[in-house]
């Protein structure tokens, strides 16, 4: 996604991918845009993403995401809201709040997520998670984390990780992160 140079902490970006059907460039077309602001301890971002349907005459999916962080030094707060809509079977609002607390050379991370299914199925869910990440070097860290999901009204969400979709409503993960 191309982006403009930062101006007073703001960065804007946009994308378009034309559909791949001959004679129907709008079919399965993807468009998106984002705007972020970063200055000192504050970071705020908004993005929009739209995929048109295979006929090119309406949306198959739309996502709106708004989030941010604020670093107080002793604690960093995180917040995110994402709305996803599509045909009658997709209308959800996901809300996340979290904290990062420096402790013993690493960071304790905790979060709460609420998934609000706004369709008649009303398959909501809540997830809590807590973990600890310890840096071994500038680019490598080890971590341990626990998460639990509480499904409601027949929802079937599972706790997963970066490599697996998950099979249950509770999980404990340990791992290594290396940034290239």
Image (spheres, grey):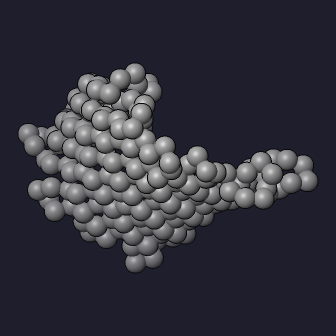
Q: Is residue 129 above or below residue 168?
A: below
Camera-side residue: 15 or 81?
Answer: 81
Judged left or right of residue 39, residue 144 is left
Residue 128, percent from left and from top: 25, 40
The total of numbered circles placed on residues is 0
Judged left or right of residue 108, residue 94 is right
Let me know if residue 162 appears in the view.
no
Going 39% across and 43% down the picture, which residue do you hit?
A: 124
Camera-side residue: 137 or 44?
Answer: 44
Camera-side residue: 28 or 154?
Answer: 154
Name the residue at the top extreme.
167
Judged left or right of residue 27, residue 35 is left
Name the residue at the right extreme.
23
Going 40% across and 78% down the picture, which residue do you hit?
A: 8
Q: In this view, does 165 lie above or below 17?
A: above
Going 30% across and 40% down the picture, which residue do you hit?
A: 127
Let me know if residue 31 appears in the view.
yes
Residue 51, percent from left and from top: 66, 53
**Picture quarter with the N terminus:** bottom right
Residue 25, percent from left and from top: 83, 56
Q: Quadrant of residue 59?
A: bottom right
């Amino acid at each position: 996604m191309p982006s403009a140079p930062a101006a007073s902490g703001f960065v804007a970006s946009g994308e378009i991918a034309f559909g791949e059907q001959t004679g129907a460039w709008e079919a399965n077309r993807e468009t998106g845009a984002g705007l972020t602001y970063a200055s000192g301890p504050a970071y705020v971002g908004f993005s929009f993403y739209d995929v048109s349907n295979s006929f090119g005459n309406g949306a198959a999916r739309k996502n709106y995401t708004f989030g941010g962080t604020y670093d107080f030094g002793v604690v960093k707060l995180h917040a995110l809201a994402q709305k996803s809509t599509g045909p009658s079977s997709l209308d959800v609002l996901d809300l996340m709040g979290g904290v990062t607390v420096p402790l013993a050379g690493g960071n304790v991370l905790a979060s709460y997520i609420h998934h609000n299914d706004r369709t008649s199925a009303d398959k909501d869910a809540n997830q809590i998670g807590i973990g600890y990440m310890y840096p071994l070097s500038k680019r490598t860290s080890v971590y341990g984390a626990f998460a639990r999901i509480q499904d409601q009204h027949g929802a079937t969400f599972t706790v997963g990780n970066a490599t697996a979709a998950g099979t249950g409503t509770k999980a404990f993960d340990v791992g290594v992160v290396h940034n290239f």
